[in-house]
Image: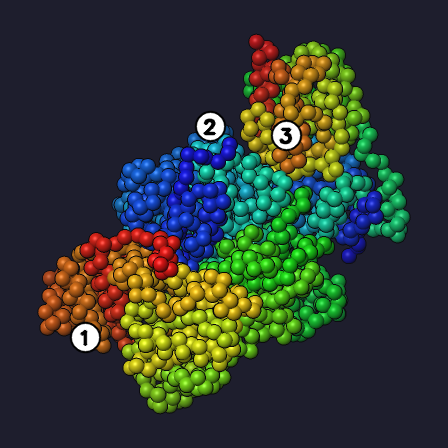
Amino acid sequence: MTQAVLVLEDGRVFHGTPYGAEGETFGEMVFNTGMTGYQETLTDPSYHRQIVAMTAPHIGNTGVNDEDPESGRVWVAGYVVREPSRVVSSWRANRSLDDYLKEQGVVGIAIPGTRALTRHLRERGAMRAGIFSAPREPVEALVERVRQAPVMEGADLAAEVATAEPYVVPAIGEKRYTVAAVDLGIKGMTPHRMAERGCEVHVLPATATAEQILGLRPDGVFFSNGPGDPATADVEPLREVLASGTPFFGICFGNQLFGRALGLSTYKLRYGHRGVNQPVQDVRTGKVEISAHNHGFAVEAPLDGPFDTPFGPAEVSHVNLNDRCVEGLRLLDGRAFSVQYHPEAAAGPHDAAYLFDEFCEVMNRAQA
Amino acid sequence: MPKREDIRSVLVIGSGPIVIGQACEFDYSGTQACRVLRAEGFRVILVNSNPATIMTDPEFADATYVEPITPEYVEKIIAKERPDALLPTLGGQTALNTAVALHESGVLERYEVELIGADFDAIQAGENRERFKEIVAKVAREHGLNAESARSVICHTMDDCLAAAGELGYPLVVRPSFTMGGVGSGFAYDESDLRRIAGAGLDASPTTEVLLEESILGWKEYELEVMRDKADNVVIVCSIENIDPMGVHTGDSVTVAPALTLTDREYQNMRDVAIAVIREVGVDTGGCNIQFAVDPRTGRMIVIEMNPRVSRSSALASKATGFPIAKIAAKLAIGYTLDEIPNDITRETPASFEPTLDYIVVKVPRFAFEKFRGADRTLTTHMKSVGEAMAIGRSFPEALQKALRSLEKSGSAFSWAPGELPAKEELLDACRTPHDGRLRTMQQAIRAGATAAELYEATSVDPWFIDQLFLLDEEAAELGAATELTAAVLERAKRHGFSDAQIGEIRGVGEARVRDLRHALGVRPVYNTVDTCAAEFAAKTPYLYSTYDEENEVPAGERPKVIILGSGPNRIGQGIEFDYACVHASFELSRAGFETVMVNCNPETVSTDYDTSDRLYFEPLTLEDVLEVVHAEQQTGPVVGVIVQLGGQTPLGLAQALKDAGVPVVGTSPESIHLAEERGAFGRVLAEAGLPAPKHGTATTVAGALSVAGEIGYPVLVRPSYVLGGAGMAIVYDDETLSRYMAAQEGGHPVLVDKFLDEAIEIDVDALFDGEELYLGGVMEHIEEAGIHSGDSACALPPITLGSHDIKRIRAATEGIARGVGVRGLLNVQYAMSAGVLYVLEANPRASRTVPFVSKATAVPLAKAAARVMLGATVAELRAEGMLPAEGDGGTLPMEAAIAVKEAVLPFNRFRGVDTVLGPEMRSTGEVMGIDRFFGVAYAKSQAAAYGELPTKGRAFVSVANRDKRAMIFPVRALADLGFEILATEGTAEVLRRNGVHAKIVRKHSEGPGPGGEPTIVQCILDGEVDLIVNTPFGSPGQSGPRLDGYDIRTAAVLRGVPCITTVSGLAAAAAGIQAIVRGDVGVRSLQEHAQALRG
């Protein structure tokens, strides 16, 4: 059997067997702790340029179906698993994950040491890595090549994953609101969750200007999740949206941009949150929601109470109970808010779906 | 929200004796609860009739009542203790049912006791099937979720049942309400099945209610473990997938965690439904379990049921994830919310999260069908397993193979042994019926050429699991074909969970050779941590499992280490009593400055709790697995010794091999253990000590056996040599039966033939010996006469008919044996006192089943003391420390000491068609203790705890063997004096009448109904007209008439749940007990009060 290798930039090497497409690939090495939802994870644009390792050992058991992808393609730069499934067991599946990865040209590797890899990343932080299906060079040379790959800090990737042309997701049932959604790497479930609640969602390219956004006369503006370093993004359009008083809701990258628009800074977490079991507390109610996460950066904000911003006083609305990281922001007047995690889930629990209701309520109030 | 300040004392109800469907998982949960409540400063009052539990150790509660868990007794406790609150959700169905009864009778209101952890309405909503169906429908409607219930009809009479069957069609599932472990449930394929199963179900249900529902046989089956706090935070602790599809009780299924064949969409829908259902049911705080079935063809999902309490699956989920459900449920019940409780494993993150696993957990059931000849071995919705083993691995094949070898039963693990296989069709056919070891049958079918499609068609096991069996078969083939056992070949086999023994079998070499080679090549497992978070955060608690992976996570040791080997899966003869001893040793040795390392694979136990020992290894108890743990521990610091004498036969069987491998075994040496087990050597020990044993001989042929029997005289006790738990033992009264017994033995194996002392009193002794001084822990006198396995026999402590002179002789004899054998630690000896002679039946230099009973009856922690002695402390030192009494011992209890009666609990209601007569082979699953100043009361309590209150009026039926006729007269007269109407078969009635006891003659079963339609005794019992049955067995197997009559009588008694006494001494004790109840002087007293009295 061919020997594939996973090489980290600090020289650590994991041996395994090729999985999915063969070849070589580079990216930021991260791990995801979800036990379900590999199909959603693979197609989440936020994983662009990242090599994702799954901590759950058995991957691919339920194959691949046509309903669960979060976008039109696989975005991960590479895939690391322990025990790839040899068969498909699901009444909804129409092909195997292995075939799907091959078809999408995604280079993967199966290694026994996924836990060792996770522990390594936990201790040393996220770092660059490369997968080589049939390496012909010595390890030292491979490490060198990994070190030449671009780093995630400073990477402006939203435009690479976002739609080039605007499109509309129609409301399901009666249309009640128009939402302008800026696609920074949006997942399919997000406009769907809004559409379910009567929103007609106009998805705009990442480069949309304030004029284009507000030109739709939306009831609310939404900024999506997405890959890359939030410090590189232009927050002027968002500032103008906020200045206009239009209700705003942001998720993940959208939360980071909201933070920056409010004058806060962002920073890179050592190894990020990627999984579907993170406890987030709503600061106002004290309630805990189990939430889906996928972020390597976070917003720096005062946890001890409201703070002033150019758009009025704001506060941290949600906090991660594992590491006290900021998970949500809100203007005290309630018209703009955002969360760092994924209320649209897919994959993950639906505990935070109420945030879409809140967005609708804010728009409803603004309409009145 | 912080803890409630308006509650000061809490009553916790345990689950009583270990029975099928309710085992030591509730000791685990109850112990957790008691620890939490005490740590939070509450006064804890506990009631549990099971003395073998850790929770009933006096230090876990302020007032510990080893009293029957019946509404009557619990009310007495409430009246005496006046608790502010009652926590009923950690003691299984028993505790929940008792709480419901106390609520309904107004006791809780009268004494102002608040139910915490679940309210009455939630219990009803969760357990009442009609209401539950409505809830599921409402959840689906209001939340737009994909959820429904199986189509079903609730029935209260047989006519209802027949009408419902017309509507739903066959096959049908029959489920009685409010019974635990699925008692009385089953599949009805036609009307006669329905009449039989639903009839029994209506009887078994306390509300005379059964549910008939559409069959979802063969669907995928899942469970979610859910926790909710009073702020409405909800987390799913664990998902569990049953490999055996719908149709096999989850307790009898091979299960895996996490679920492996669901997409996120289906899993999240299940999660949403679970949460919505729990909110709707109104489980305010605590853990519950909810079960689902999924149609593999369409994904249609059915919500089967929920338990608004901690369950067996919660224990499994806790061990599988490191999330301590019971502990957290207790904290939630007293007011905390999930975010306020830290995760013990990471210590930095809160409990308000959902564990994520980077390993696979497999649970396999352990059955004991060999103990119940005639029992139906088909697995159904009616749970039949007596225990379970769990294993953890980094892949499903690794975890599965570890789990199968954890069962420690030959034939459990997959086998690729060379040799002829049965035909494929035959194996596929066998797979169609769920049975013990079906996965292995499937594996054999693969070897015989079955395809995945054929196996799926035969079993409905999900194709993913079937493929994993194929994977193992391919790996075995590759291993067999390898030219040489290189490190790479071995590593690959090991990653798939192959044991050294399996590798040896495939390669045609011995296990030891494989191990030597493997070690020489440096192929060893690493130990990973169960950390709740897939390594996202660092774990602070060393809860470890072996795997052939990359990084070893065993932390460095700080103190000298002692490794304690646990007892593995529960089985008949080896259960919670041994876990009790192991846990005690761990607590005490940790206190004494050692680092304690526990090795066990039973997820139900306290020993496999991550905070019982300093380190926990969740591992099979095979030589290979234990040697690797010892090696791993030796790498991080000195190991002082391994304790093998506390976990029962499992670790004891490893003693010599461990010693041979250079492992320090502390306590009684393996050679001494052998000395006690080997008949010739033990005979010399007895001779030296001047102690007699019953006359005996050994035979391998019919003629040989007849000649031995001729020499020593009938009756004789026969058994194959080297058997455990009395397997294959019989008492034989004549040549004909002996010949038949010998003919049935496997050729050539020696059979031991002992003189059976049928008139003797049997005595059990537990003692402690340090090499110099003997501490007699307790002397127990059997209530049943000789010939019944000590594990099944009721006994009394202190002995009720032995004087101090007898006890002196017993002490001297025990000391002689201890010295002769070379005991360092515990010793159990069984004696028979016959015609003034004290015979030694057997001696076991290890913890016995009765250690916890003796400890509780005498208020002395024997297992703790034993652990210290094994590590070098003397009895004198322990007396000085106060662990043992300063003077005297369990043989010198004061006259006013309370009498404790131990009674065995038998699982005959699970195995219809099995004879209930007790014999030399142990068949009980658990035990209870009744304790009181008076023997009669103690006995009555033991009966109430084990089987339900003894009747105080009504009809008693008496039919005894000739040899018992003289002895029965006095106690039967006592019953008649108490107002019982006496029914008897002709012979018995004559004797009674001649002795002035009026007895009405009833027809024997073999006589059939009379000319005027007079019913037989069996019919009377079935009609519910008999309240107490006394039936002693007749003669020997093979004798027809009377024996068969007895069989039918006892079977009917089990069916109707009528107390059935099968010995005259049992009858005498029962009569004394009934007298006490009638007098009304039955009170309750805590162990702490008893201890005070003993010390005072």
Image disc number at residue A319: 3
Name the kind of residue labelled 2 in the image. Answer: Glu
Identify the chain of the residue marked 1, using the numbered disc in the image. B
Image disc number at residue B142: 2
Picture coordinates of residue B261 (x, y %)? 59, 46
Say if B152 sits above or below B467 in the image. above
Name the kind of residue labelled 1 in the image. Answer: Arg
Res A80 visible: no
Same chain? Circles 1 and 3:
no
Residue, x 43% and y 46% (percent of image)?
Answer: B90
| Residue highlighted by disc 1 | B966
Query: Residue A175 versus residue A243: which sits nearer the camera?
Result: A243
Picture coordinates of residue B277 (x, y %)? 46, 35
For the N terminus of chain A, which image quadrant?
bottom right
Res B286 visible: yes
Colour scheme shown:
rainbow
Identify the chain of the residue marked 2, using the numbered disc in the image. B
Residue, x 66% and y 16% (percent of image)?
Answer: A313
Of the residues under marks 2 and 1, which one precedes in the sequence?
Answer: 2
Picture coordinates of residue A78 (x, y %)? 76, 42
